[in-house]
Image (cartoon, grey):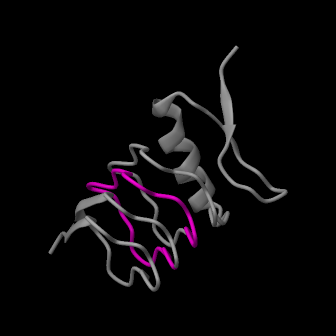
């Protein structure tokens, strides 16, 4: 029986397998159908190469999360914790980082 955790604190909680291979697919699917991941606990997750265009990650915990190579166009990280996260070679035009904690965030967008 797989272990599950709550990814989102609202009544529309997203339950995901703790299997890291499945987590990226679940997060991509949630973003694709415009599910808000506000307050989500994505700390330390591997989301490299994920298509998260237009995702809502307000107040999410993304401490140490790997977003390298991801599509983050128009993603909203308002008040999110991005301490130690990595966003190398991302497509990040129109990304919103207002009020986000960005200490040690590595961000180098693709030109």
Confirm whether the magenta stretch covers residue 53: no
Q: Residue furthest left?
A: 111
Residue 99 relative to residue 11: left or right: left
Residue at the spot 36% in from the left edge and 63% down from the top edge: 71
Instruction: Return the residue nearer the eye: 11 or 54.
Output: 11
Residue at the spot 53% in from the left edge and 68% down from the top edge: 55
Residue 46 at x, y = what percent? 39, 43
Residue 7 relative to residue 43: left or right: right
In the picture, residue 18 is in which quadrant?
top right
Residue 81 at x, y = what percent? 46, 66
Residue 22 at x, y = what percent? 52, 33
Residue bounds of the magenta highlight: 56-78
Instruction: Return the residue nearer the eye: 90 or 44.
Output: 44
In the image, residue 7 above or below residue 11: above
In the picture, residue 38 is in which quadrant?
bottom right
In the picture, residue 97 is in which quadrant?
bottom left
Q: Residue furthest top?
A: 1
Instruction: Return the residue nearer the eye: 4 or 30.
Output: 4
């Amino acid at each position: 029986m797989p272990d599950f955790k709550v990814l989102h604190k609202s009544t529309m909680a997203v339950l995901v397998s703790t299997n890291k291979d499945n987590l990226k697919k679940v997060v991509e699917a949630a973003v694709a159908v415009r599910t808000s991941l506000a307050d989500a606990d994505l700390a330390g997750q591997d989301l490299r190469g994920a298509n998260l265009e237009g995702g809502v990650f307000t107040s999410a915990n993304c401490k140490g999360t790997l977003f390298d190579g991801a599509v983050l166009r128009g993603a909203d990280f308002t008040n999110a914790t991005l301490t130690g996260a990595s966003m190398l070679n991302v497509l990040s035009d129109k990304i919103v980082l207002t009020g986000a904690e960005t200490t040690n965030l590595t961000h180098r967008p693709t030109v």
